[in-house]
Image (spheres, helix red, strand yellow):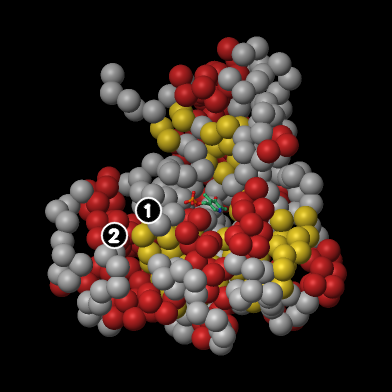
Amino acid sequence: MADRRLLMIPGPIEFEPDVLATLGERTRSHLDPTFIEAFGRALENTRKVFLAGADSQPFVIAGSGTLAMDMAVANVVEPGDSALVVETGWFSQRMADILARWGAKVTSVAAPPGDAPSLEAVRDALRQARPKIVTVTHVDTSTGVRADVEGIAKLAREHDALTIVDGVCSVGGEVLRQEQWGVDLALTGSQKALGVPPGLAVLVAGPRAMAAFRARKSKLASIYLDFAEWLPVMEAYEARKPYYFATPAVNLVAAYDTSLGKLLVEGMDARFARHAKMASAFRAAWQAMELRTVPVREHLTANTLSAPYFPAGVDTTLPGKIGAEGIVVAGGLYPTIKTQYFRVGHMGSIHPNDVLATVGAIERALAKAGWKRDGLSAAAAALSA
Ligand SMILES: *Cc1c(COP(=O)(O)O)cnc(C)c1O
């Protein structure tokens, strides 16, 4: 039988056939009118997906989510700037590393794995550090913890700091209202909730982030990361004109255009609601199967992935056993607890049937490992609620 295993990791995810079909079309010149139209439309639609203002600037660049993180930091940080990292997992720590590499003085406000610092703790840290930049990981994929981006961005504004949101595991799945929430720079990678194969870094810089970039005293040490090189490219394509700086990932950009078109047909609010519903069915299943999760409270629990602990007597061989039941899930990632839990991605075009197939495979694998619990009934009930 063909490999029909369902990819349920926190990126890459299962992609829609028409997105893959676009990806597989003949490669056009980056100067071809059809491509110019697709890229221009994709840039316009990027703003709509991020719910960003008309005065914001999207960048779509070949690279992964980490490139988007590097690019965001590189363009607004100058050596000696102070930055505050709201730490909710391993990807927040990566952001701290990136900030330090670009010369920022980094302070972190952290919580134990599975928790998030309170807004009071963030406020205290802002008062002490007086940072130019605050970074927050919307959903930290290592822990499944979702941060209060709206609350943190508001506090950052009050303290005159720019907010950078790592939305790699959230944009297109979790509610993110970039303009309304006052998020200055938000970023993601194509392969997660935006539903496009890996390879595109996507950033939307608001007016304050662009002003910070324009006010730089030093030239960027990297040409590929420099907004100054990419800005004419993005502006030109949006005006439906070609412009060359470095060859765009033509096929991926075309697939990205197809996928964003589909996202907007569904509608962002409907999409957020669907992710919330699928996640609630998973949460009902974890509870029914008596699996504790890494996020310690319901409101910290992401809608784009789950991170359940292994129950007593079950170990790191479980993800492989779930794979044998037809569903690909991921192991743990946060260093101090990585052998104690596994991760299930549920974003993008996730459908109730995917939820039931996944819960069923986990239930069967757990039963084989000696943990017999019914998760399917609870998931099915939550889906029909
Ligand atoms: C996946 C992920 C990244 C890294 O993205 P890559 O595409 O793997 O480079 C960064 N931050 C978060 C929150 C992620 O989920």
Residue under numbered circle 2 = 249
Q: CA distance from mark 2 to mark 1?
A: 8 Å
Tell whether circle 1 marks a residue whose Cβ is less than 8 angstroms from ligand 1: no
Q: Is residue 348 above or below residue 105?
A: above
Residue 365 occupies quadrant:
top right
Q: Is residue 281 above or below residue 257?
A: above
At a point 79% along the width and 66% down the height, the residue shown is 122
Q: Quadrant of the N terminus?
A: top left
Pick the front one: 109 or 263: 109
The local crowd at label 2, few if under 14, some if 14 to 19, many if 20 or more residues have their Cα within 10 Å, is some
Residue 260 occupies quadrant:
bottom left
Pick the front one: 299 or 385: 299
Residue under numbered circle 1 = 199
Q: Please state which amino acid type lies under the numbered disc 2.
A: Ala
Tell whether circle 2 marks a residue whose Cβ is less than 8 angstroms from ligand 1: no
Q: Quadrant of the C terminus?
A: top right
At a point 54% along the width and 70% down the height, the residue shown is 74
Query: Left of 157 or right of it: where is 319?
Result: left
Query: Left of 148 or right of it: where is 376?
Result: left
Query: Left of 25 or right of it: where is 366?
Result: right
Q: Which mark is residue 345?
A: none
Secondary structure under badge 1? loop
Q: Position of residue 98 (x, y in %)?
A: 60, 60
Q: Please state which amino acid type lies under the numbered disc 1.
A: Gly
Tell me whether the residue at label 2 lies in contact with that at label 1, contact meaning CB atoms closer than 8 angstroms. Answer: yes
Secondary structure under badge 2? loop
